[in-house]
Amino acid sequence: MARRLISRAAARLGPVLLAAALMSSGAAQAGNQKEEALGDAVRLALENAIRDGRPPKPVLRDEVARVRYQQWFDAMSARLKRRLPDDQTRTEFLEIAWYEATRAGLDPGLVLGLIQVESAYRKYAVSMVGARGYMQVMPFWTKVIGDSNRRALFDMQTNLRYGCSILRMYIDMEGGNLYLALGRYNGSRGKPEYPNAVLAAWKNWEFKQDVMVSSR
């Protein structure tokens, strides 16, 4: 699915415009979600997702899952080292990104690609419209589904939890259409530049498992 969406993105945007969109990822250029009227059930689900106090540590059911996660972590850590050179910060970031992405039913590579476009992995990035942190979450969300603590959006786990939960909501609202959901996340639904940039960045974080381990 990812490759099919990326191919469509390249065809629509064209190589020159796509390159320009990716080059712009060095700045916090997105993060303009619109405050929408949410149904009670949607708001409650988001509130519950944000309040989940479990630590963001991978819960791995068996040896196959453990090996798969370790291979993913090693591959992503090597790719991310230039952007996050501190080993402890990079480890914490990847653990949280994997946990929050899988918890929200998202491909961790998609989340990493979105962060690349949104903030270029800058924890304290702030966009021109006030969106904050890695996933450029708009502060109004803390009032709609949180505790109104806008400063918490600069906390690594809080930011990724909000971002992943909001993207999951948009995907559900769009009936699984990732292209339109990404547009909603950026506040530019129906326009190609942002979804295409994220889909292209996702390709940088694709992961293929090297070895399969049989569980006994």
Image (cartoon, grey):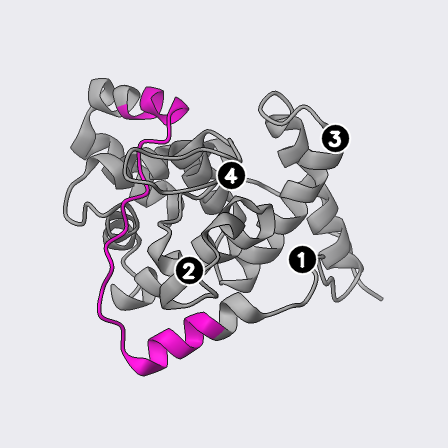
- Vertical comparison of 150 with 125: above or below: below
Residue at the extreme left of the image, as rendered: 190
Extent of the magenta region: 21-47
Marks 3 and 1, the one that precedes in the sequence: 1
Q: 47 and 66: which one is in front?
A: 47
Marks 4 and 1, the one that precedes in the sequence: 1
Examine the structure image and report whether residue 113 is included in the region drawn in magenta.
Answer: no
Q: Is mark 1 on a helix, strand or loop?
A: loop
Residue 86 in the image: state x and y as whole percent. Answer: 71, 27
Q: Is residue 60 left or right of residue 108?
A: right
Q: Which residue is drawn at 67% across and 48% down?
A: 95
- Vertical comparison of 44 with 32: above or below: below
Q: Mark 3 points at which residue?
A: 87
Q: Mark 2 points at which residue?
A: 142
Circle nearer the viewer, 4 or 1: 1
Q: Name the residue under label 1.
A: 56
Q: Label 1, label 2: how many angstroms apart (C-alpha)?
A: 20 Å
Marks 1 and 2, the one that precedes in the sequence: 1
Q: Pointer 1: residues within 10 angstroms few (<14), some, or many (20+)? A: some
